[in-house]
Image: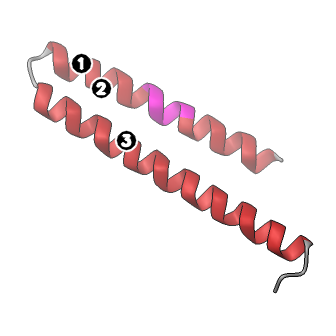
């Protein structure tokens, strides 16, 4: 249960950091780089969620003995 909450806080932290960096870059006139920062942040979070879902399916598989 603790790892789940830790992962949620990591995703929230990445979102906050990406939003702040993107806002600073857009106000500095670097809209292209701000979009790339947002895309890279999305990919990192998507990778984390994919690993989380993989672990969930492995747990379900081991609970129901589908090995």
Q: Which residue occupies the extreme right position in the image?
A: 64
Magenta stretch contains residue 14: yes
SS assignment for the magenta stretch, majority: helix
Q: How many marks?
A: 3
Q: Earlier in the sequence, mark 2 or mark 3?
A: 2
Secondary structure, mark 2, is helix
Horizontal and vertical percent position of residue 37: 26, 37
Q: Which residue is mark 1?
A: 24
- Point out the stretch of residues depicted in magenta: 12-16
Residue at 63 percent of width and 35 percent of height:
9
In the rendered image, which quarter is residue 11 located in?
A: top right
Residue at 39 percent of width and 42 percent of height:
42
Q: Earlier in the sequence, mark 1 or mark 3?
A: 1
Is 30 placed left or right of 59 in the picture?
left
Is 60 placed left or right of 14 in the picture?
right
Q: Which residue is mark 2?
A: 21
Relative depth, front residue between 57 and 22: 57
In the rendered image, which quarter is residue 56 located in?
A: bottom right
Mark 2 or 3: in front is 3
Density class for disc 2 (Cα within 10 Å; few <14, some 14-19, many ≥20) is some
Secondary structure, mark 3, is helix
Is 23 placed left or right of 45 in the picture?
left
Residue at 74 percent of width and 46 percent of height:
4
Do the numbered discs 2 and 3 sit on residues whose CB atoms are within 8 Å? no
Density class for disc 1 (Cα within 10 Å; few <14, some 14-19, many ≥20) is some
């Amino acid at each position: 249960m603790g790892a789940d909450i830790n992962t949620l806080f990591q995703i929230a932290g990445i979102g906050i950091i990406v939003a702040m960096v993107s806002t600073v870059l857009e106000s500095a006139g670097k809209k292209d780089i701000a979009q790339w920062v947002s895309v890279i942040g999305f990919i990192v979070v998507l990778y984390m969620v994919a690993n989380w879902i993989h672990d969930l399916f492995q747990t379900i598989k081991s609970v129901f003995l589908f090995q």
